[in-house]
Image (tube, helix red, strand yellow):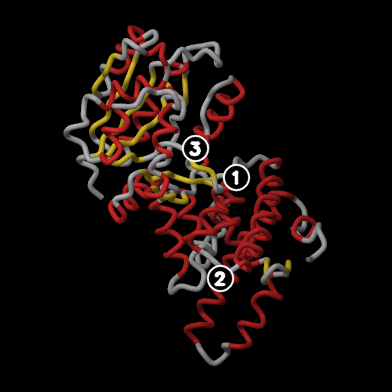
Amino acid sequence: MSSARIVGLIVAAGYSSRMGTFKPLLPLGGKTVIEVAVDSLRMAGVADIRIVVGYRSAELYPVLDQLQVDIIENPKYSQGMFSSVVAGLKTFAGDAEAFFLLPGDTPVIRRHSIKDVVREYRKTNAAVVYPVFNGERGHPPLINATCFDRILSGDGADGLRGILNEYEADSVDVPVADQGILLDMDTMEDFNQLTCFYLRRHIPTYDECLAILNKHQDDDRVLQHGHMVAEIGKSLASHLNCAGLSLSTELVYTGGLLHDLGKGKPNHPKRGERLLRCKGFSELSSIVASHMDMELKPECAIDEAALVFLADKLVQGTRRVSLSERFTPALDRFAGNREIIDAISRRKRTAEVIWNQAASILGMHLDEIVFSANNP
């Protein structure tokens, strides 16, 4: 994907009046908000990044000077965001083919969202391409040079939105599995929510998981099965954490939801792994890759991948089953095929190792956890 002629324009010139503190320099995961916004564009391949400053600009310069970005002063920042868009656009209108517009207070955008928007733009050459999550448009839209003159000649009465609405017939929406496109920070409550999202960004949220499945998997049974696997895995992880382990219940739950993402395709664990790795979820992709076939020796420690593997073997469709109930029919069915029998037996042994380790750590029979709820 080439984005050499696509500019990333970040506007950070406003008063932060609703927040009550200067938003661009708020701390976010060891960086500042403005640094995270730059990272969001740069990590997706946008090389030309420009930042419009105004209010308290002197405080931003020491940070921005380290980021290899172009800094644009907007002396009219008191007139609102549209004036900052115009100030920025004037610096590249004759050179760029399009630009991403990212408000500085919407800093956490997943890399794959930017790439998906660019891919759609290359395919359609639309006037505006909007990322969409759960049916709602978010940031950053990609605005084609078709709109530049109209923006530069606008009076700002209806803001940028009013101008872009004129191009609605030539605009397209791109569904993305990215809740961050909707998360801005007008209040401290918003900022706290954004911080939580950023700190766990390596794991998709529940709604993001649903968006991923909606895009790549059209079999409702996969989601129903995934829910059951996720619930069992999370319950086991929670109990084990109470016994002294440090497992990520979120990672286990998400792994359970998405473990069959590639179901119905050849080598579906590998397909699911690739899809998730491309979206930046490397830990999760490894869990999905090993959910069907892994080997855990008795001396190895239980991890999140092991719990998803076990939980998957304890669910047949949407029904909770014992390991014997899960494996015995398959062993009987393929009794004449040594290669298949060896594979099934290996999976059964691995599941039994995980089961026995967990039971030993907890000092209880796992049936009390796995079958604590009635089968659906």
Amino acid type indicated by mark 1: Glu
Q: SS of the residue at dot 2?
A: helix
Q: Quadrant of the C terminus?
A: bottom right
Q: SS of the residue at dot 3?
A: helix
Mark number, residue 236:
none
State how far apart marks 2 and 3 are (Cα).
38 Å
Image quadrant of residue 333? bottom right
Q: Residue at image x 60%, y 71%?
A: 348
Is 72 or 159 nearer to us in this picture?
159
Q: Nearer the viewer, mark 2 or mark 1?
A: 1
| 219 is higher (above) or lower (below) than 36 | below
Can you identify the residue that label 1 sits on?
Answer: 250
Amino acid type indicated by mark 2: Arg
State how far apart marks 2 and 1 are (Cα).
24 Å
Can you identify the residue that label 2 sits on?
Answer: 347
Q: Position of residue 271 (x, y in %)?
A: 42, 65
| 263 is higher (above) or lower (below) than 284 | below
Q: Residue at image x 37%, y 49%?
A: 170
